[in-house]
Amino acid sequence: MSVHTLSAETKALLETVSVATLATALYKRGLRNQVIQDVRPVVPKGRNMVGPAFTLRYMPAREDRNQLVEFRNPKHPQRQAVEACPPGHVMVMDSRKSATAASAGDILITRLMMRGAAGVVTDGGYRDAMNIGQLEMPAYHNRPSSPTNLTTNEAIDINVPIGCGDAPVFPGDILVGDDDSVIVIPAHMADEVAREAVEMTVFEDFVLSKVRTGASIIGLYPATIEANLEEFAKWRAASGR
């Protein structure tokens, strides 16, 4: 697990920026595959999900090992993961990019929320997605999926490096989700990426304000004309940003 911790300051910054902007900041650092693909909010919340990753890995199910009786086992990894995920963390599940069977349902996700999790992400699907969408806690998935996870997946390992929607996720990495998608920030980069993304957002807000008044993007985005940079400085001072 990463030894880097998420500071309150960095968390607050990450709550104000988009996944798209964070993706550009990571691209500048050579990281091009940090957005979790084919994953979206069950229901948009209008705010960012931010927290360190706590992971659960699924593998292909073998029928003799995955009967309903397995859920009676108090050490079942899926149940154990829900009870072990620390408050403030995001539970991230590697479901093999398969929504043919559910990663979890509304009872387990509600328990996760009541234990103080910051959110939950799977590259598979959820049972009872209509109920999960009504929860206060952000949840992300591929699509609703009613069959129990035992149908095609076996929960096999907790808090290990995983792949989720083709993105590498290490325990302790910082997950940020907005109303579009979810991105994984390596923990040791989180502070600098958060600060840069905030700066990028300020400039992009200026650009949008200009475009809405009819300005061309040529020489503005990116700002290759000095006059635009001068105008940005004045706009920023006037807006207090």
Image (cartoon, grey):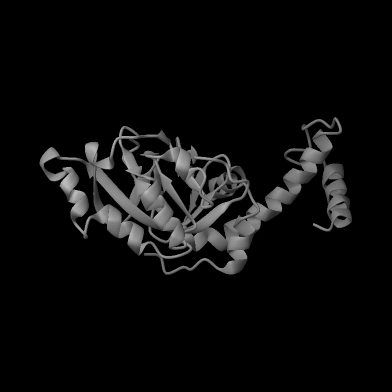
Task: Return the residue nearer the eye: 79 or 14.
Answer: 79
Where does residue 224 sit, x and y in percent of width and height?
77, 40
| Residue at the limit of the structure toward the left, as seen here | 64
Q: Position of residue 153 (x, y in %)?
A: 24, 41
73 sits to left or right of 226: left
> Within the image, what quadrant is residue 157 found in?
bottom left
Vertical comparison of 67 with 192: above or below? above
Residue 70, percent from left and from top: 18, 49
Whether residue 131 sits left or right of residue 237 in the image: it is left
Q: Is residue 158 visible?
A: no
Residue occupying image coordinates x 62% and y 55%: 15
Q: Nearer the viewer, residue 193 or 89?
A: 89
At 62% from the left and 61% from the top, the residue drawn is 12
Q: Is residue 102 left or right of residue 233?
A: left
Viewport quadrant of the N terminus: bottom left
Q: Relative to 144, say whether 6 is above or below.
A: below
Q: Residue at x 75, y 47 (%)?
A: 203
Q: Position of residue 9 (x, y in %)?
A: 62, 67
Q: Is 82 in front, or is 203?
A: 82
The number of callouts visible is 0
Q: Is 203 placed above or below 99 here? A: below
Q: Quadrant of the C terminus?
A: bottom right
Image-based side of 161 in relation to 89, left or right: left
- Note whether residue 178 is visible: yes
